[in-house]
Each structure stands twice: as C-alpha cells, then as structure tokens.
Amino acid sequence: ARTVLETHGPRGFCARAISSLAGISQGRLLQYFKSLDDVAFEAYAEWINEEFRIRGAAATGATPRERLANLLTCGYERDLNGPQVMRQISRYSWFWPVETEERFAVHADKVEGLIAAILAPLAPKAEPERLQMAAIGVLGIYMAVLRRSTVLGWTPSFASARATELCGPILDGLEAKG
C-alpha cells in the first residue's frame, strides 16, 4: 500500500493496484482492512514510525534551539525530498474525516512528546501542560510550513529556516517565564 501511495498518489490508490502489487485478490485485501482508508492509515503509520526514529536521532545539538532546528531540518528534508506519501498526505489531509484525524493524533502525540523533551531545558520549572502547549505550537507551525512548502515548492532549507523563525517567539516565551 505504501508503494502504491508513493508512486501513484491518492488518485491511484485503489484496491486493484494494492492487491495486484501484493499478489492477492481484492477480496482478500478487504478481509484484513475495513476500507481503503484503513489501508492508507496502516501505510502511513508504518512510515511515520520509521520517520520518528530517524528524526529523534537527528535532534542533536548543544542547545534546545539547535536541537529543534536540527529536528525541523531533518523533517523538511525527509518530507519534501522523500517519499511522495508524505507530500500527498500533507496536501490532502485537510479533507480527512474526523475518525481518520483522530487516528493520526496518536502519531502527533509522539512527535509532541519529542518536541516537549527538546524544549524542557528552556523552562526547567515549567509545568508539563505548558511544555505540551509549546510543543503543539511548534508542531502546528511545522505542519503549516510543510503544507505551504508542498504547494509553493519551497526548498527544505527555506522551509526549515522559516519554521525556525516562526518558532522563535514560542522558545522566547518559555525562556522568559522559566
């Protein structure tokens, strides 16, 4: 399913293409999944778990700002230059039904946790809710810049610089309030 999404995009994502590539019948495919949305979600979940490991390893640096900038850079390089699946998902996710969005929230929670861990040294006495809200803000900026990048053709380095700049006030606020 992931290969079909990567090569054909959402318009070419159909039971016939997936089952043909997998060497099974369409009926057999739909025995294991309730719908094509479920198949797409599993393909995305596999990909995002792999990406989470890669991006977590990239979040290195001497300061929280450097770690966050490296995480953003890795993300944009992989999302904008990598498999078509993320470019397609970021473009069409505005149209997902609520149930699909709720399932993807599990993965967003993992990324928010990683971002909150990066931000924690900026405000060592901050309550967890404050760090979580800051992480949600950073993730929101990341996704907004990603969507804009896919539409406008921004390079990963430009997208990363723009997102880092937009995240500045969040980081400044954490440092100011400690």
Image (cartoon, helix red, strand yellow):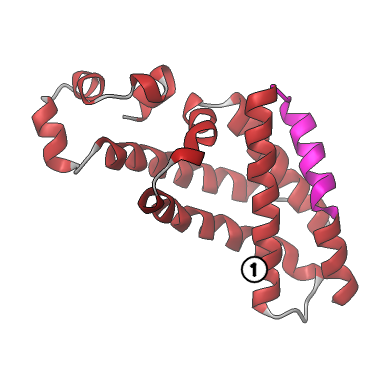
Expressed as whole percent of the image width and height from the top left, the position of residue 159 reads 75, 34
Q: Main secondary structure of the magenta part?
A: helix
* Quadrant (top left, top right, bottom left, bottom right) of the N terminus: top left
Expressed as whole percent of the image width and height from the top left, the position of residue 149 reads 68, 30
Residue 2 figure quarter: top left
Figure check: 118 above or below 127? above
Q: Which residue: 70% across, 74% down? A: 130
Residue topped by disc 1? 132
In the picture provided, is 115 more to the left or to the right than 84?
right
Q: Is residue 61 visible?
A: no
Figure check: 12 above or below 148? above
In the picture provided, is 98 more to the left or to the right than 162?
left
Q: Nearer the viewer, residue 99 or 59?
A: 99
Expressed as whole percent of the image width and height from the top left, the position of residue 144 reads 66, 42
Figure check: 102 above or below 13? below
Please state the extent of the stretch shown in magenta in the rendering: 153-168
Q: Secondary structure at mark 1?
A: helix
The outermost residue toward the right is 176
125 part of magenta stretch: no
